[in-house]
Structure formats: structure tokens, C-alpha cells
Image: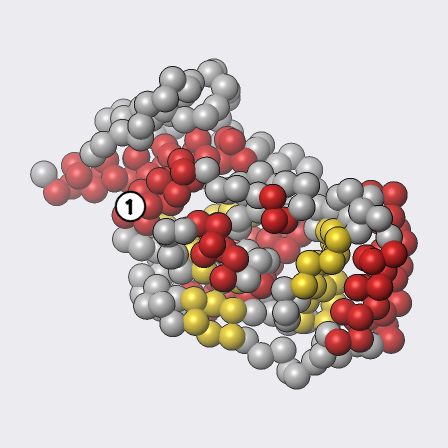
Amino acid sequence: MGLLPMDGRAFINLTDRFPTHLRIAPIDVDEGMPLPELPAPDPRWALFLDVDGTLIEIAKTPKEVCVEPEVRTTLCRLSDAFNGAIALVSGRPIETIDQLFQPLHLPTAGLHGIEVRNAADATYRVSNNGGSLTKIRETLEQFAKKTPGILLEDKGTTLALHYRQAPEREEEAKRLLADLLATHDEGYHFLQGKMVLEVKPSGINKGKAVEHLLTEAPFAGRIPVFIGDDVTDEDGFATVNRLGGHSIRVGENGKTVATFRIESVRQLRAWLVGLSEAILAGTEAAKG
Ligand SMILES: [Mg+2]
């Protein structure tokens, strides 16, 4: 079992949480940072990971994010550790996720579960009962155009209205959306995320995507673990709780049904490195 490349960053000792045979990997965390209480690693897990605010830090605009090489390395190792039972579950389209994580090509649920790509590389699109976003899109486009700092992200079947650069417009944006959906309700609703209002089809969510993936290999029969940071992840948490799995929310803020919390993206990454090491070490030990 190889270690991740050394580049002079801090070490963290994960051995009191994981088995003593665990190797210690260099990771990007503060030395001595306390680790939160999280479930003990189990090789029977299937992992479902949100992307923005979970695996990677949120940027000023959605296009400015970057996925560091260490994150790809960790995901590869987790995929080995859990026999491929790892999926990304995001509000972004699958196509954008692939661009961000290339050359990785993981099972992925995009657009909050409207599109799902399984481990066999087949992609399903969940129908939204033929509702149309046209009127809502037009109005939001006009609003974004005339309001500095408001950004409309058009993902085709969902919309995201970002106000990170104009937080004083939050109430105005929410009122506009509420009025719009009341007038043009064609099966859509909106959810408030971190400095973003997400318009998406009712009845489709990240939890449904997780359930769908769990019907197929290599996810079927495994214990689901959902990790996310925001309101749209709550459906994922509720689903895995119901199925006897574990739910982990990244960040200290926000009401949640998740049974565990971890403070930050950096802490989660540290935990994921330790998790892959622990499971891979266990697998090696069992073999030999
Ligand atoms: Mg997120």
C-alpha cells in the first residue's frame, strides 16, 4: 500500500480513530486538529458524496471552483477500498462534474438526482412530468441582468440563482421566486442553499438518486453513507437514515437530520484519507 506523495504539509495522527496498523498519510490539515466523532470505518459501506462545500470549497461563482489533485487521489483510493461503491451526488450536471474531476469518471447523480449515471456507465434521466421552466427562466434572466451581483446558472432542467456577491438582494430574490412559482407552478419548487436559490422539479431529490443507485451493483446490499453540506443534501441524509446508514453534514451551521457533523471541507478530506487507508489496510491484512 503506497502513501500519498509527500510535499511537506502537516501530518495528522488518525490512529486513535482507526486500527493501529493504519499508515499515517500526509494531508492538508493543521497539526493537532481534533477529529470529530464519526462512525467507525466499515468495508461494507457505499459512499455518496456531495461536491461543492463537501469535497471542494465553495468559490465566489460556480465556475471558479477547482478540484485539487489530492481529492482525485483520495476518491480513487476510496473507490478501490469500497469496490467501486462510491458516487458523487451534486446539483451540477454530470457533464460539469466530469470536467471538474477528469480523468475520473465515477458513478454520479447530477442536477439533484434528475440524471443518474450508474457504475455500468448507463445514464438515466428522471422525467419531471413535462413541466416547463421557460417563464421562470425568462423572468430570472431579466432579474439577473438588471441586478449587479446576481448570477443565474442555467442547468437546463434546473436553475440556480446565486446572490453571493449581492447578499443584500436575498429577500428580493426570494420574494420574486415565491411569486413566480405561485403563478407558474408546473411542478417546480425552490430550495435555499448557501447564497443560492435552487429551482428544481418537485419530487426529485438526492435521496431518490441514492435509492436508485442502491438497487444496482456494486452499491446494492451495502450500508449507505451520505455526506453533504447543504439544504439539498437533507433528502440524502433522511434516506440513508431510513435505510440504516450514516449521514454526515459538513459545517457547523444549519438545521440538519444528519446524525454526524464534521467541521469543514479540510477535516472531511482528512477523514476520507484515513478512511481509505483503514479499509485498504484491512483488505490487505485479510488477503495475506
Ligand atoms: Mg454542497
Q: Which quadrant of the structure image shows residue 180? A: bottom right
| Quarter of the image with the C terminus in it | top left
* For residue 191, side relative to residue 96 (left or right): right
* For residue 135, side relative to residue 227 (left or right): right
Q: Give the amino acid type for the residue marked by disc 1 in the picture.
A: Ala
Tell me if residue 153 comes above or below residue 11 in the rendering: below
| Quarter of the image with the N terminus in it | top left
Residue 106: % across, % down: 39, 56
Q: Secondary structure at mark 1?
A: helix
Q: Residue furthest front?
A: 145
Q: Is mark 1 within 8 Å of ligand 1?
A: no
Q: Which quadrant of the structure image shows residue 64? A: top right
Which residue does the image show at 49% across and 35% down from the upper left? 268
Would residue 259 be visible to someone looking at this image? no
Nearer to us in this view, 57 or 149: 149
Numbered disc total: 1
Residue 38: % across, % down: 47, 36
Which residue does the image show at 73% across and 74% down from the upper left? 133
Residue 218: % across, % down: 31, 61
Q: Residue furthest bottom?
A: 130
Which residue does the image show at 58% across and 79% down from the upper left? 127
- Residue picked out by circle 1: 81
Nearer to us in this view, 188 or 156: 156
Tell me if residue 206 comes above or below residue 14 in the rendering: below
Which residue does the image show at 75% across and 53% down from the upper left? 151
Would residue 66 be visible to someone looking at this image? yes
Residue 54: % across, % down: 54, 43
